[in-house]
Amino acid sequence: MTKRYVFGSPIETDAILCKPEAEQWENGRLSYQENALTCEMEEEEIVYGLGQAVRGINKRGWIYESNCTDDPQHTEDKHSLYGAHNFLILDGESRLGIFVDTPSRVVFDIGYTDRRTLRIAPRTPDFELYLISGESPDDIVRQFRKLVGRSYIPPLWAFGYGQSRWGYSSAEEIRQVVKEYRENHIPMDSVYLDIDYMERYKDFTVNQETFPDFAAFVEEMKKENIHLVPIIDGGVKKEDGYDVYEEGKEKGYFCKDEQGEDFVLGVWPGRCCLPDMLNEEAGRWFGRKYKILLDQGIDGFWNDMNEPAIFYSEKGLREVFEKIDEYRTQNLDIKTFFAFKDLVAGISNNPKDYAAFYHNYKGRKYCHETVHNLFGYYMTRSAAEAFEELAPDKRILLFSRASYIGMHRYGGIWQGDNNSWWSHLLLNIRMMPSLNMCGFLYTGADIGGFGADTTEDLLIRWLSFGVFTPLMRNHAAQGTRRQEVCRFAGRDLMGEVIRVRYMLMPYLYSEFMKAALGDGMMFRPLGFVYGDDAVARRVEDQLLLGDSIMIAPVHEQNAAGRTVYLPEPMKLLRFRGGQVWEEAVCPKGHAYVEMPLGDVCVFLRENRILPLSKGGEHMGEVDFSNLRLYHFGAHVQPYVYYTDDGVSRECDLSHTKTLTV
């Protein structure tokens, strides 16, 4: 059951599609005073949710801020990441779902100030509150997802393995990457184009010197069964003669400062203007610009820098230079030296800059900081709505860095600019269920890590988890170690791991589609299913994937295996050397399982079916009809199997059939 309460005069976010009638607020388990919601948490109560956030599956013990933030250092002391996902579930003696709908910052103090107290503090007293009661966390998630709408569904090819790097500087370099993968028979379906493909980092342009005859190159790659996926950034270069800038300026589509002038900030191209993505007319204009690349054969995009990221504002940069001139003649003691460091370090993503420009949103003028969390959402929405007009008969791949609940209807997300750290592999594992709760099913992290230098064993272990995530992309930053699997001595082992992805694809695609169409989750914590098992409720690094399997990835360096908790008897299936090895049934309880580098292990639940294919070197080679069914138990349940053409927008559960043994 869902109850809706309205506080003050909320700004509409379009997160909720079907709103229940508002009710009169009365303090119950949650009390409201001094613009904060508070409640006491039970000793053993678990708090799930908040989508993209640091720390564990259970969010107790820390302060989280819902405030889209460009920060690649995802360490435990941080409070915000790239997304703003204000949905959580309290799971104790009773269960309660909480969604705070407001487009600006919200602080969730989940037992940090007081270990047993949850305190939710929106930035303003204007918000809508949804309280959802249910029999289980799954029940609450389904109710919530019905409120916010169906999750985005990408084309089938987008579930294949993708290779990316900031620094692919020419078509010839990409040809070489594809050649190495194909010659080594390592499966791959896509190559991502970072900002290097653009003409001086300008949106919707192509560098004609390094990527000549781009449309022909796109077609050449498609003949290799490779889809090219270019990046689009949130800032438009301020340059006379650049048609996108000139048109946006002429029509007044850019965000304004207090004086009504175009707000100027710095991102990749230098000085830029921000399209007012929240302005319906400006958003439609920006979304239709994707046609420039669609017309050249592109069928997938990733939106970046749309928190929005601000390297500097023109005004802020001027003030910093003036202050540096003052410091130039000073003796920099400990106080002035650190003030100098903070001055320069604080120039990017400065809160003063987010309070210095405005949007025209739903007919009213709003300071950006008031609606900050909607920018990336509406950038991605503008593209998705344009695709419905420009490519009505096919799915287009689209995912974003920044997001708010509601954007899940228009695109997926990747989990931001992580690092080549073992802790970020663990964070990737823990983040999957909470993002699924919020409707973000098409998601994954940069495999191997974006920043820093990866190691061969970290990449193998990350690939061994990445074979399960809907978005499976290896992405690395310029200046880091080359991360393509062909660059490593263990390329054959890595290739075997990636091939597991294509063997699993009938199951992964089926479970994804059923979760999307049935308002469910693809990845769930053990506590969602084994809620009466006190041990299962505390497991933070094992996940249920769909209805049939559990996964327990290795996430520690030099580990040759790991201890696994089995909440029921399960059969170990080991993928090794292109084969599936069926091992003994593991009884309920703890067990140490050897998992050498290159082995991918799944735990099959009793009386469930896992359908597998023979694999392939790209999605077009995967046979979704001739399947091998793995199972054990005396009363094997039929498996509801979803399959379609992977292209058409029309998707429903009529595409299912029943598999039996």
Image (spheres, rainbow, N blue to C red):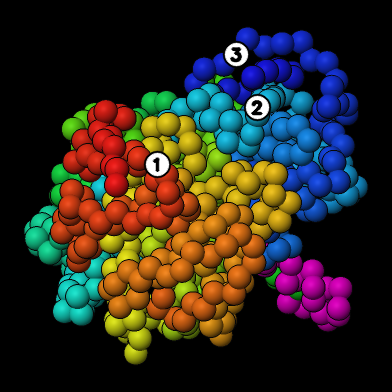
Instruction: Give the mark toward the camera: 1 or 2.
Output: 1
Q: What's the magenta region? A: 328-346
* Sequence-earlier tag: 3 or 1: 3
Q: Helix, strand, or loop for circle 2?
A: loop
Query: Based on the displayed image, in which of its 4 quarters is residue 161 positioned?
Result: bottom left
Q: Give residue 26's position: percent from left, percent from top.
A: 83, 15
Local crowd at mark 2 within 10 Å, few (<14), some, or many (≥20)?
some
Local crowd at mark 3 within 10 Å, few (<14), some, or many (≥20)?
few
Q: Residue at x 65, y 29 (%)?
A: 135
Q: Helix, strand, or loop for circle 3?
A: loop
| Residue 344 forms part of the magenta stretch | yes
The residue positioned farthest toward the front in the image shown = 634
* Sequence-earlier tag: 1 or 2: 2
CA separation in Å, label 3 and label 1 = 37 Å
Which residue is tagged 3?
A: 20
Q: Which mark is residue 637?
A: 1
Which residue is tagged 2?
A: 134
